[in-house]
Amino acid sequence: MALPPVFMYHSISPSTLPDPYRLRVHPNRLDRHLRLLRRLGLRGVSLSELLRAHERGAARRLVGLTFDDGYTDYVDHALPVLRRHGMTSTLYAVAGRLGGTNEWDDGPRLGLMDADQFRAVAAAGHEIGSHTMTHQHLGGADAEVLRAEIGGSRDALQDILQAEVTSFCYPYGEFDAAAAEAVRAAGYDHGCVIGDYRPGDRYTLPRCYVSPRDTFAHLIARMVRHELRLRL
Ligand SMILES: [Zn+2]
């Protein structure tokens, strides 16, 4: 069986500020997405849980839920919705920017969770993965940058969480063979990209982008497309 779809969210917020990169989903829409999954008999889980279940042949009724960058709005607006639906997720932290902002974007500044917030989210049963130290482009990066961004962020997060960090997410979904090898060498169990269905391995797992305007029909179309592309 193919790996079930893994959905990629970023900011979950009712804010009406400009959203030039289309990264913001309204909490009510997230609520509707998760309600749809339940209606389809599906449950959202962290990427690590999804992979473990997949390896046991037990992932038929699961999908992955991931939230990139670690925005503070996750605590206020995603966590309560996930809890209401009995679902978990993987949150990807930019380890060198905890408590800061998304200064790598030229869009509106958004707050990033601090170490205490990440610990609280982990204690609530969600997975914390790494999204590098500084949200660097990793395609074509040299060995020193790869080691600092990929290995360094794992060490930093493990220190903060006092737990193993096994999941990695490439900023901008950008990677090459050297970056994927650096993720493996740093001790991660897997890594995920964005919508890239070229043949890969567990260090380049594809995810489905969720748009701010996705309705039920869009989400179902994304799931069907995921199935079809993995079967090609
Ligand atoms: Zn990101």
Image (tube, grey):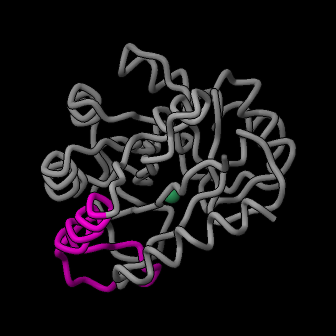
Residue 19 within the segment the image draws in magenta? yes
- Residue 32, how many percent across, how many down? 22, 71
Residue found 46% across the figure and 37% down from its top: 95
Q: In this picture, is 45 found above or below 63? A: above
| Residue at the farthest top position | 162
Q: In this picture, is 209 found above or below 180? A: below
Residue found 74% across the figure and 29% down from its top: 184
Which residue is at the front of the view, 216 or 198?
Answer: 216
Which residue is at the front of the view, 149 or 68?
Answer: 68
Residue 49 within the segment the image draws in magenta? no
Q: 40 left or right of 83? A: right
Q: In this picture, is 112 found above or below 28? A: above
- Residue 1, how many percent across, how many down? 66, 46
Residue found 19% across the figure and 51% down from its top: 85
Q: 141 left or right of 210? A: right
- Residue 218, how many percent across, how many down? 44, 82
Residue found 54% across the figure and 40% down from its top: 133
Count of numbered badges drawn on the protein: 0
Corner quadrant of residue 147: top right
- Residue 4, how many percent across, how many down? 55, 52
Extent of the magenta region:
12-39
